[in-house]
Image: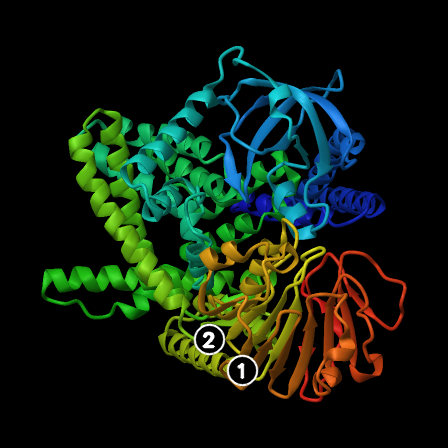
Amino acid sequence: MKRTFACIGAAALLTMCALTSVNTFTAKAVFITAFVVLFISLIIKKTRSHAALPVIAATVCVCCVVFAFYGFSVEKKTCALDDRGKTHHLICQIISLPVADNGRVYYTVKTEEIDGKPNVQKMRLSFKEYLNAEPFDRLEGDFHTYKLGAFSSETETYYCSKGLFLGGYTDKTENLIITGKIGFHPMYYVLKAKQFVIDTVSLCVPNEYGGLLTGFLLGEKGRVSEKTLNAFSLIGSYHLLAVSGLHITVWTGFVYSFLRALKLKRKLCNSLPILFILFFMALTGFNPPVVRAGVLMFFVFAGRLSDREADSINSIGFAVTLLVVFNPFSALSKSLWLSVFAALGIILVSGRIYAVMNKKELKNRLLEFIKTFSLQSFAVSLSVTVFTLPLTVLFFDRFSLVTPIANLVLIEITSFAMLLSGFAVLLFALKLAFAAYPLFFASSFLAKVISDFAAFLSKLPYITLSTDFLPLKIFALLTPFFVFSVYFLKKRNKERLIKIVSTAIAVSFVFISVFGVLTERKRVRIYIPAVGDGMSVALVYGNSASLIGCGGNFFAYSSVCDIMKKEGVAKLDFLFAPTNDRFVYSFFDELRNGFDIDMIKECEYGLVKLDDGVSVECRVDFAYISCKGVTALILFNPDYNAALLPEEYSSADYLFVRGSEPVNYKKDGFSSVIVVTDKKGDSSDLIYAGDEIMYLEAEQNGRARLETAN
């Protein structure tokens, strides 16, 4: 059987992904069915000799057993601790560098004892400030524990894919006992090296461009602004700031070329990159895409040492098998799925696309080099986009129409900036700062170019489409199938067919994009973010958005950011904060730093006319929205006497009020009354927007229903 590990990897990935979403009875049924199929396939000579069916059935059986033991172990260790608010005494070891986010500092730890009993598992602990501790120091104290992602299935899936199930927090850091590390820990030196890279780049490039360089090198985005992250997300190039196969491929290729330039022996040139691969995987925390690419590169160099050519698809299968066996929940990792499909696109299709486009050779060597480089980059970018298109539609809210162009321009510049900054860090470590600073200057200039280009693209109108758009879904599912089928048809002269299919795909994509943009121009959505006991209403019309009120709990800002990402909005047309009251003002500064805002009214009142026939009448106690025939009244103060409202405001299509039912209002005057609160009310006549993001798909007749955004 050819490509056995490719078959095993595919079966293992699909099986583990399925098992994570079924109950115990279904999992047992899957195991029994697979075992029966395995038994029958081994009896029948034809299936036994072909081997594919027995291998798949055996893989499913093994996955069921592994998942059962893993799931039982996780449940046993975490069940008693999934009680938000209860205090537990932990003795643990810090196994990560600190990560600062949303005003808190997070450490990943490995517990030794919990409440005096042995209990070994990974947890994510939260603190108000940085601890005076190093990796692998022992930490002891009382913590409130809770289940990670308890209020969001997407967040829960993210943490599960990283092997994290529980979190803990304490505000009494003075009561913690921190002691030095005990024993030898190889990962300590890896983490110290990672910290050195972060500190060196921060010292030499102490601005956001330094943060971008750290993101390119290690995937650490702590010093990158929300505005820049949004720009990369909107243009489909966010993967440049998340350590992936691109990073390890570029660095391993550089190490190999450097060793060759030193004219070392062949065995050293092929064995030292293997050690570097292992080090880089550890440096990035064994991130699934890095492991996938790392294993592939490992087999490439190992094959060269043994004079055998590695099978790339088999290598991917082996890497995936390792990941899902050690952590079945890694099968839920979006980055892993995207990485696998991107690699398959490059391996199977990019070379053939390049061969079709590269027909004529130019006489000028420089022009030939530029042409070859550009066509290869475009072929890789296009093949990755096509093969990951179905997953993009499945996993994300928006599809970027400029992804191929963005990646074509940015990937090579990013790779060059990454190499320059990495080499500068090495020179700095060798006490050659005088040689490192020019490289840091050059790499920071490239980071500025990358940032400015991403910002420019992200501000173009209608560069994204909603993945809920049905024609886009159909296109996303059929395109990879047609591309794969055409390129592997057993037909000698199929160049004409390739051109016909390519032209059809391109025309279809343009048509769908134009049709999608025209459809979204007509859409009006009124969002109610999950802001707890505050008040904030987001108005999305076409490709623009405004925010009325910016108050709420600790998670309110991230809730608003989620809405903007879902709608593909890079900036706000208008922000209105009627008072400095925390109920309507708590994340005003975060919004101003995180988004470009055309107009801000801070405690200023009057009529504001926006684009596309949208207007907002601003007052201290209320705001009145008129948008394409749809009207809405927002009451910031529930104690306001609604009888004082102008008559036309009392007959709006929607009424939004904070906290509780308003005083003296005409209930029959509004088609819908929405109370923005995290407390459920008793009145059946009112709609209560709770702890989920909600939205109203407004229609021209003012009628709509409240739905969850996810």
| Mark 1 crowdedness (10 Å alpha carbons): few <14, some 14-19, many ≥20 | some
- Label 1 vs 2, first from the N-terminus: 2
Q: Residue at x 25, y 36 (%)?
A: 423
- Percent across and percent down for residue 690 are 76, 59
- Residue 577: image quadrant is bottom right
- Percent across and percent down for residue 512 are 51, 80
Q: Which residue is mark 1?
A: 521
Quadrant where the C terminus sits is: bottom right
* Amino acid residing under circle 1: Arg
- Percent across and percent down for residue 195 are 40, 30
Q: Are dots 1 and 2 in contact, CB under 8 Å?
A: yes
- Percent across and percent down for residue 143 are 69, 27
CA gap between label 1 and label 2 equals 9 Å
Q: Residue at x 75, y 43 (%)?
A: 43
Q: Residue at x 31, y 51 (%)?
A: 414
Image position of 292 (left or right of 38): left
* Amino acid residing under circle 2: Tyr
Please indicate, yes or no, whether residue 70 appears anywhere in the rendered image: no
Camera-side residue: 175 or 524? 175
Name the residue furthest top: 183
Above or below, 157 relative to 307: below
Please indicate, yes or no, whether residue 519 appears anywhere in the rendered image: yes
Question: Which numbered disc covers residue 222?
Answer: none
Camera-side residue: 251 or 63? 251
Above or below, 308 relative to 612: above
Image position of 518 (left or right of 118): left
Q: Which residue is mark 2?
A: 462
| Mark 2 crowdedness (10 Å alpha carbons): few <14, some 14-19, many ≥20 | many
Above or below, 18 relative to 179: below
Find numbered disc 1 in the image and state the secondary structure of the residue it sits on: helix
Camera-side residue: 220 or 285? 220
